[in-house]
Amino acid sequence: MTEPESISPEETAEIPKRETFTERIIETSARNQFLVFVLTIFAVAAGFYGLTHTPLDAIPDLSDVQVIVYTEWEGRSPDLVEDQITYPISTVFIAAPKVKFVRGESMFGKSFIYVIFEDGTDIYWARSRVIEYLNSVRGSLPEGVNPVIGPDATGVGWIYEYALVDDSGKHDLAQLRSIQDWNLRYALSSVKGVAEVAPVGGFVKQYQVDLDPNALVAYNIPLSEVVNAIKLSNADVGGKVFEVATTEYYIRGRGYIKKIEDIENIVLKVENGTPVYLKSVGNVHLGADIRRGVAELDGKGETVGGIVVMRYGENALNVIDGVKKKIEEIKPSLPEGVRIVPTYDRSDLIKRAISTLREKLIEESIIVALVCVVFLWHVRSSLVAIITLPIAIILSFIPMWWLNVTSNIMSLGGIAIAIGAMVDSAIIMIENAHKALEHFREDHGREPGNRERFAVIVRAAKSVGRPLFFALLVITVSFIPVFSLTAQEGRLFRPLAFTKTFSMFFASFLGVTLVPVLMLLLIRGKIVPEKDNPINRFLIRTYQPFVNFVLRYRWFTLGCALVILALTIFPFSRLGSEFMPPLNEGTLLYMPTAIPGMSITEATKILQIQDRQLKKIPEAVTVFGKAGQAETPTDPAPLSMFETVVALKPPNEWRKGMTWDKLLAEVNANIKTPGMANIFWMPIQTRTEMLTTGFRSVLGVKVFGPDLSGIQARRADRKRTGRSPEYAQRVRRAHSRRLFFGFHR
């Protein structure tokens, strides 16, 4: 056996060090500058495409994956609707796949069933499952009952509201409602992204027959025969064809009802050759269908309104723009004197929110650029970080568009959080290159040539490239725990985590590809040494004594840190908590709590009085009040539920010294309705809170029990002990008017 040859230290130093993956990327990028620029240009173009096609909204949609089953059964009481419709349908969906829970709500003549699916379930897969299970229960429902699924929209999909106003006075509420139902409704529904246009207020015209009981008895005609005669008389029939003079003619019978006289002349029976017409036993006239909702504008009286509901996952800003364009197209076709008044427009909020964040992003970028110039003390070198920052931001929109992450205050906030760390790698690489060039001048006594400068800068970038790349990756993955959040917490914070992760990833990637190339192009001319930079020299002289002190008195420093940490426990324990920071939407939603069982006449009167008082506020533009339900499954509101949207002027047009809190205090003082407590919200905030808790106030109480009689007895006990609130007693008296229940898996 031969002894192994020993290697001298000199020979060890001559062995080439194996380059890491990041070092090879830096070297390759530096030697292929044209290719790096071409790929960067294509990537930026893709980023601009993603930027312009990413959906825009004010806040993330926090609603669950939900499918609504809506059923009408006219004239039936809530308990009958619950027993015959709501309960049978709800029990079917308990066994459906991916269903979290089922909520049912029964009202007078209507049933609402909410099927809530697990997070991540495709909305259209969920809708197909609901239709499949719904078909299996149709046979057990009462005759003539036809349950339907609601629009493919969410609870916060109300993006645009308007009112129809007649300045000429020639059109009544029934005519305005006809314009809404037969003109506006279908025209706006054709806009891309609109799931539904829900009418509210006005009168739906119908033919009404007032029968005389005495006449029915005299002619011996039962009520069922009258109903069947009207049904059979409202139909067209078809026949065969016949030929006359080489021309073919179709035979058909025209029988559809088109006017009151057509109904009056319906034959109910024939006695001794004499027909008995419907007009002989009753009076036929035009009337209004039963109403479960009214609308009012500016305290001037009832009006007809419409609510545009956006389809799930659409771009809210694009949908609203499409609706506005369609309204402009419709305006010339409206009757003389009829105009459309916008009462709620979410695009204003979206534009304000995005504009504010855009301004802050620009301000942050400018500050970062100034910091780079000041501390690097070399304008051309600072351009490396200044150019890299917007490119990384633009590239982050590519995965946002691909994953359909909405551009909102949370997602753009993630980019704002990441801006400071995104330029770290570029700044450190530049500083290291400055140091390397400074050492070269000190060692050789001259400026480096082109090849030497290339080698020095690339070597400097490679020496810090690997730790910088992985340091940025560590920051990138720091938000991964946020992705584990579920339900509304996940839907709120995941967009922020996504965009921060995307931004940091592209910043780290550009740090080993584009940054070395830009350094080779821009780091030229005279480089000021660090010791000659007045800003750095001042900071180092200021910082050095503190460093020496804390290193000399280590235990004292640690003790002070622990004491300061302990002092934060008390204020931390007194901090309030909120699921979501309040967002001033610029629109006020007034939702007073009314007495259950209120009649539509009383609701209309009170609504007009309240709207008139709200319109007196100088900051108010329009006041659009709604009591009861709009004709949409997304609005299960009773007549006792008031929703008044107050569109406000921009804050710069408010009275001098007026703030949001002062405005609310003034409104609260001016509106005092006996038996109704004032509640002031904002539209999106209200929808979000009601989706989360089912309440329209900050504090609510739910009482559960085996049956209503037991719950009522329990409340009676509390009343005797003096602990039952007055409003709870009013709700107890109305429990038979509105019934709720739910199933949980």
Image (cartoon, rainbow, N blue to C red):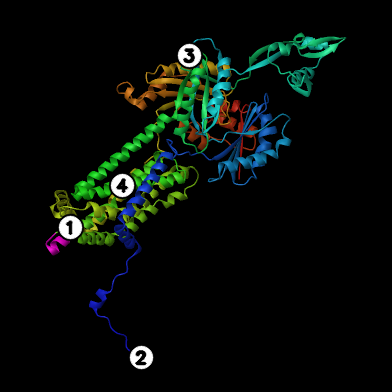
The nearer-to-camera label among 1 and 4 is: 4
The nearer-to-camera label among 2 and 3 is: 2
Q: Position of residue 262 (x, y in %)?
A: 72, 13
**Whole-number angstrom distance, CA of label 1 to CA of label 4:** 35 Å
Q: Which residue is mark 2?
A: 1
Q: Quadrant of residue 201?
A: top right
Kindly check if marks 2 and 3 are in contact, taking CB atoms under 8 A apart as contact.
no
**Whole-number angstrom distance, CA of label 2 to CA of label 3:** 110 Å
**Whole-number angstrom distance, CA of label 4 to CA of label 3:** 54 Å
Residue at point 63% right, 40% down? 130
The disc labelled 1 sits on which kind of residue? Answer: Asn
Q: Quadrant of the C terminus?
A: top right
Earlier in the chain: of badge 2 and badge 4, it is 2
Res. 548 mark = 1
Earlier in the chain: of badge 2 and badge 1, it is 2
Q: Could you say whether the residue bearing mark 3 is in a helix, strand or loop? A: loop
Earlier in the chain: of badge 4 and badge 3, it is 3
Earlier in the chain: of badge 1 and badge 3, it is 3
Callout 2: few (<14), some (14-19), or many (20+) C-alpha neighbours within 10 Å? Answer: few
Callout 1: few (<14), some (14-19), or many (20+) C-alpha neighbours within 10 Å? Answer: few
The disc labelled 2 sits on which kind of residue? Answer: Met
The disc labelled 4 sits on which kind of residue? Answer: Leu
Specify start and end residues of the magenta stretch as a single range. Answer: 438-446
Q: Quadrant of the N terminus?
A: bottom left
Q: Position of residue 710 (x, y in %)?
A: 63, 34
The nearer-to-camera label among 1 and 3 is: 3
Toward the front, the furthest residue is: 246
Q: Which residue is mark 3?
A: 300
**Whole-number angstrom distance, CA of label 1 to CA of label 3:** 76 Å
Instruction: Using the image as rendered, state which of residue 116 and residue 314 is in the foreground.
Output: 314
Q: Which residue is mark 4?
A: 389
